[in-house]
Image (cartoon, rainbow, N blue to C red):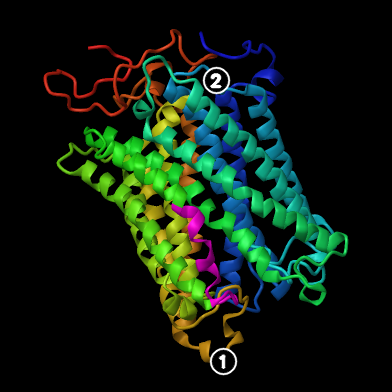
Amino acid sequence: MTGAAHEEPTSFLRKYVFSLDHKVIAKQYLFTAISMALVGGLLAYVMRMQLASPGQEVPGYGMVSPAGYNTLMTMHGTIMIFWVAMPLLLAALGNFLIPLMIGAGDMAFPRLNRLSYWTFLLSTVVLISSFFVPGGAAAGGWTTYPPLSGSAALSGGAWGVTLWILAVALEFAAFLMGGINFITTAVNMRAPGMKLFDMPLMVWMQVAASVIFLFSVGPLIAGAVMLLLDRTAGTGFYNPATGGDPILFQHLFWFFGHPEVYVILLPGFGVIAEILPVFSRKPIFGYRMIVYSTIITGILSFMVWAHHQFVAGIDPRLATPFSITTILISVPIAVTTFAFIATLWRGSIEFKTPMLFALGMLGVFLLGGVTGIHNGTPAVDIYVHDTYFVVAHFHYALIPPVFFSFLAAIYFWYPKMFGRMMNEVMGKLHFWLTITFVNVTFLPMFPLGLMGHQRRISNPNFFEALRTPEVERLHDIATIGAIGLLLSQIPFLINFVWSLFRGREAGPNPWRATTLEWATTSPPGHGNFEVAPRVYRGPYEYSVPGRDEDWLPQNVSG
């Protein structure tokens, strides 16, 4: 093999545990994140059961106190955003695909890559350990707003939020290392002949997400350090009694938090951009237009954060400009979405499992995007803010790029990762169960929010006006959906493990795709490529006139 920046390991520990190989590190991120997804999913199950039957024991868990519910809600949100979405879409897929898609032997900095994963794993251990300290885990919400998070009595004891802050800091350090690696690799290590506009859109999306993360994370790190000092050293950055301002933390958090949405969304879009051309047998529509839209999205993502604070005490005169930027950022996202839809037009569409999840992502995401305009409009946001309408919106905005895109990616690149095909029947069963129960879970939350039901309340009967059969029925439907959604992942887990040993051997290019990762063995060996590839064209040459085959790989001349 050629192109690796390090020698091929010979021992088990060097090959599979302390590996420098980007492919092994990608799988380490993958399995760690899937494990955390199980934890986050179980927390969601307990919350939904509590909301459906307040005051009763949750099967398999016991009684849920109001403080315990706050912990469940805080840790569910934290885990699913930081320890599931980011490692799955950014770290696992980025690590595995970027070198392969650009024809490189490995990442630019393999040792930094290894340090990135082990720092992330340490952050996972710290976060999970916070469940077992005196006072319990953090309970101040996944956004950890002060003054609630600044009080040990109100936010999970003396250690809960402190360990939360430490875990987040470690995780951010890991992704800073990874982001630097992704950008450097894509800029400097492309195969001969591959220009910037010959890169697959997945690489563009990963690089854009890494750049957004690098520029946005600094203020939150500073804000978290100030919060830690408030809790441990007696400072008063967020304490009004000592001249501090709790609203400051909200600005620092959301200056990172809303760009973070696009750190997750863009790699999800990258997955869809790779799958649609393969299963419609057409070039991607508007390649350069998508690239420019991605760049514009990244720039605008830094100009929308305060729409989270329309009811938080900011100057009302700020509402209009942030409402305008919020609506503006939907334009490049819509351009990309319609380019994907145009790719399907008159295509020879094959409804394989990856394609089903890609199409499902587009359909479900549209509902999340449309309802985001409501939340970006101050007059409406004042009414629906902190209700279940917002819960429904952000799950419809995040589940498609995280959950559907990730599953599409696994079904699509599983043959390249493990050399075997996943079972199609099990895959399609998994898709139809998943898309059904996602909607059963979250659609009822829109009317719940419009009826005025507050989120983050452990007992729906707390408000006299909400003690209605309609509310109880909607909570019951959402709870049935959540349980069904969790159970729907059993076929996926069985398929994943069974296919490792019994799946049909894939060969190098089972999908007849054109990008460089399909030009090597499945799975790729050390150094990725037997001979360093040379690139002659863009990444999506399908249905080329005059050719017997309907695909023309990037590395084939003529």
The residue depicted at 22 percent of the width and 32 percent of the height is 281
**Relative image position of residue 7 (x, y in whole percent):** 63, 10
**Relative image position of residue 555 (x, y in whole percent):** 33, 15
Q: Mark 2 points at which residue?
A: 106
Disc sitting over residue 495 in the figure: none
The vertical placement of 161 against 218, above or below, is below
Task: Give the quarter of the figure containing the C terminus.
Answer: top left
The mark closer to the camera, 1 or 2, is 2
Q: Is residue 426 visible?
A: no
Q: Earlier in the sequence, mark 1 or mark 2?
A: 2
Name the amino acid type tagged 1.
Answer: Glu
- Residue span colored magenta: 300-315
Which picture quadrant has residue 136?
A: bottom right
Which residue appears farthest toward the front when viewing the image? 317
Name the amino acid type tagged 2.
Answer: Asp
The vertical placement of 419 against 431, above or below, is above
Q: Magenta segment: does it hold 1? A: no
**Relative image position of residue 547 (x, y in whole percent):** 15, 18
How crowded is the residue under tag 1: few (<14 C-alpha within 10 Å), some, or many (20+)? Answer: few
The residue depicted at 32 percent of the width and 55 percent of the height is 363
The vertical placement of 379 against 500, above or below, is below
Q: Name the residue under label 1.
A: 464
Give the distance between the C-alpha atoms of the residues marked 1 and 2, in whole angstroms.
Answer: 61 Å
